[in-house]
């Protein structure tokens, strides 16, 4: 099967969040399973063509309602996966960052969808390759299913199946009506979309017109059917419930491997972590200017510092905990200025117990995963989450709120001999619930080290590889193609 994935982000070229990790990793796993998966993304101005051996492929003039722009398409191979990068100044090719201001991003990403349609057709003419399935991701490329639908009088487009993956439904590309009209996009008349008056919502358009839809965890797929998680798109998600699947994101287990990770002070695996892993903790304590104390529980946070992540609960709970218990905290992240200041203040108020690194440092992140005893993710909502999976693979026990992918991946400790459990889970979005769970975890750390080690081993053995998830995506692709084939047969029958 020929599959083309398209997105605003993909590692290693352009990354803001987890979307980039998925689009960069999934095609590799798909290709290992026999799928001819390729990726097309914007050719942002900051991407180094020499570093990635990016070469010119085709160029053409693209006429659209607002004028004519040159489109330049470049190509390269990344881990065996063909990538195409689209430049078309001033929309794409000159920028220093992925995202800009809302009104400009609306215009340029709507243009991107139009230019991608033309590019896919030009690639067919230039290299003889045309996808059987188009996999779009988030609002930035979710206009494509509608554009494919609008061109269904052409055989190639009529036979092209589409799948939309929702990585975070909070970001929808809404209020796009004026920009869509300006770009000459036809009216969207799908009944379910029109009934909730969201024909100007780019993500909603993708949901309405895609053959199949996925989210990044089974739990999140259920949550977004309700307004508290799906917002105004919840009714539309409910209507498409039969076509919705929740597929967990995977980890690149070759990269995320504590036995070979070059960023670690001391490598280890599930067979020898009891003797070797503590050396990482001692190293991190020293690096973070904390007292070297192997028996003091070390709490780690590696995160974007945003309200979604539950730090409004975590900060008061941690402040109470550090004031009353012998515990340490290491934080790594950047984000909202108020949260950065609050963690800096915690660092200042508890200099012997807390260190906040308000920066991005991937090597330090991996050292924290490999060093901390507890990894804290108290998110209000979390479509999938990767940190908890990385922490378990590196021998830390996650402490999470029961939501989204956190609920799917972390099993609560049984408060006994650890016959079950890979971490600690709380439900209520309250400071007291988080504080009580922190107290519980620290008590277990001191009082039941055997159970603690059993959970560490179980977490390190969990299979979070992309192979399983890629197989589920292939099943989703097949279902999408079956729907297109059935529609084609129906159209032929009506014509007869």
Image: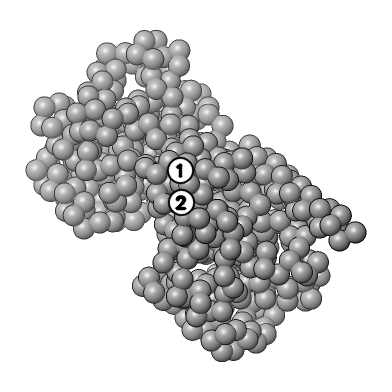
Query: Could you tell whether 216 is left or right of 336 in the image?
Result: right
Q: Residues within 10 Å of mark 2 (few under 14, many from 20)?
A: many
Give the x, y percent position of residue 452.
Answer: 37, 19
| Residue farthest along the right direction in this orientation | 496
Which disc is residue 233 wearing? Answer: 2
At 16% from the left and 30% from the top, the residue drawn is 321
Answer yes or no: is residue 185 visible. Answer: yes
User: As displayed, is residue 225 above or below residue 423?
Assistant: below
At 9% from the left and 43% from the top, the residue drawn is 349
Give the spatial CA distance, label 1 vs label 2: 8 Å
Camera-nearest residue between 181 and 432 = 181
Earlier along the polypeptide chain: callout 1 or callout 2?
1
User: As displayed, is residue 107 above or below residue 27?
Assistant: below
Answer yes or no: is residue 34 visible. Answer: no
What colour scheme does the image use? one colour
Helix, strand or loop status at disc 2: helix
Residue hosting label 1: 224
Give the x, y percent position of residue 106.
Answer: 45, 71
At 21% from the left and 53% from the top, the residue drawn is 340
Helix, strand or loop status at disc 1: loop
Disc 1 to disc 2: CB gap under 8 Å: yes
Quarter placement of the C terminus: bottom right
Snapshot quadrant of residue 312: top left
Query: Could you tell whether 487 is left or right of 177 in the image?
Result: right
Give the x, y percent position of residue 393.
Answer: 47, 34
User: As displayed, is residue 148 above or below residue 258?
Assistant: below
At 34% from the left and 56% from the top, the residue drawn is 360
User: As displayed, is residue 414 above or below residue 476?
Assistant: above
């Amino acid at each position: 099967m020929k599959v083309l994935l398209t997105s605003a982000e993909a590692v290693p070229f352009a990354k803001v969040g987890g979307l980039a990790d998925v689009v960069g990793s999934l095609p590799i796993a798909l290709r290992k399973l026999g799928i001819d998966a390729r990726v097309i993304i914007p050719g942002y101005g900051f991407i180094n063509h020499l570093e990635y051996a990016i070469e010119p492929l085709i160029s053409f003039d693209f006429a659209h309602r607002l004028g004519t722009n040159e489109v330049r398409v470049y190509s390269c191979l990344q881990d065996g996966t063909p990538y195409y990068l689209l430049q078309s100044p001033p929309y794409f090719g000159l920028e220093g960052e992925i995202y800009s201001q809302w009104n400009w991003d609306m215009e340029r990403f709507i243009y991107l969808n139009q230019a991608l349609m033309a590019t896919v057709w030009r690639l067919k003419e230039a290299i003889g390759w045309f996808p059987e399935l188009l996999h779009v991701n988030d609002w930035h490329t979710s206009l494509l299913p509608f554009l494919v639908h609008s061109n269904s009088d052409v055989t190639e487009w009529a036979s092209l199946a589409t799948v939309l993956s929702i990585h975070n439904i909070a970001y929808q590309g809404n209020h796009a009506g004026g920009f869509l009209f300006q770009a000459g996009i036809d009216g969207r008349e799908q009944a379910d979309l029109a009934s909730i008056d969201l024909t100007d919502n780019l993500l909603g358009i993708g949901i309405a017109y895609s053959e199949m839809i996925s989210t990044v965890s089974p739990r999140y797929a259920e949550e977004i059917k309700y307004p508290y998680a799906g917002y105004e798109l919840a009714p539309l998600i409910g209507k498409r419930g039969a076509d919705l699947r929740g597929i967990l994101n995977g980890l690149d287990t070759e990269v995320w491997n504590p036995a070979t990770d070059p960023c670690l002070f001391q490598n280890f695996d599930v067979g020898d972590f009891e003797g070797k892993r503590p050396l990482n903790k001692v190293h991190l304590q020293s690096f973070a200017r904390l007292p070297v104390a192997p028996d003091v529980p070390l709490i780690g946070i590696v995160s974007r510092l945003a309200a979604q992540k539950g730090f409004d609960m975590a900060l008061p709970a941690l402040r109470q905990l550090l004031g009353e218990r012998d515990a340490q905290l290491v934080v790594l992240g950047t984000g909202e200025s108020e949260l950065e200041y609050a963690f800096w203040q915690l660092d200042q108020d508890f200099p012997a117990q807390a260190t906040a690194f308000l920066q991005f440092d991937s090597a330090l992140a991996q050292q924290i995963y490999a060093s901390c005893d507890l990894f804290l993710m108290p998110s209000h909502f979390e479509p999938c989450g990767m940190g908890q999976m990385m922490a378990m693979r590196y021998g830390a026990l996650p402490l999470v709120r029961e939501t989204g992918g956190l609920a799917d991946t972390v099993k609560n400790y049984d408060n006994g001999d650890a016959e079950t459990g890979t971490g600690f889970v709380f439900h209520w979005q309250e400071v007291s619930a988080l504080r009580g769970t922190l107290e519980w975890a620290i008590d277990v750390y001191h009082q039941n080290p055997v159970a603690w080690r059993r959970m560490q081993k179980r977490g390190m053995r969990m299979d979070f590889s992309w192979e399983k998830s890629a197989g589920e995506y292939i099943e989703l692709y097949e279902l999408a193609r079956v729907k297109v084939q059935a529609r084609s047969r129906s159209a032929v029958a009506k014509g007869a």
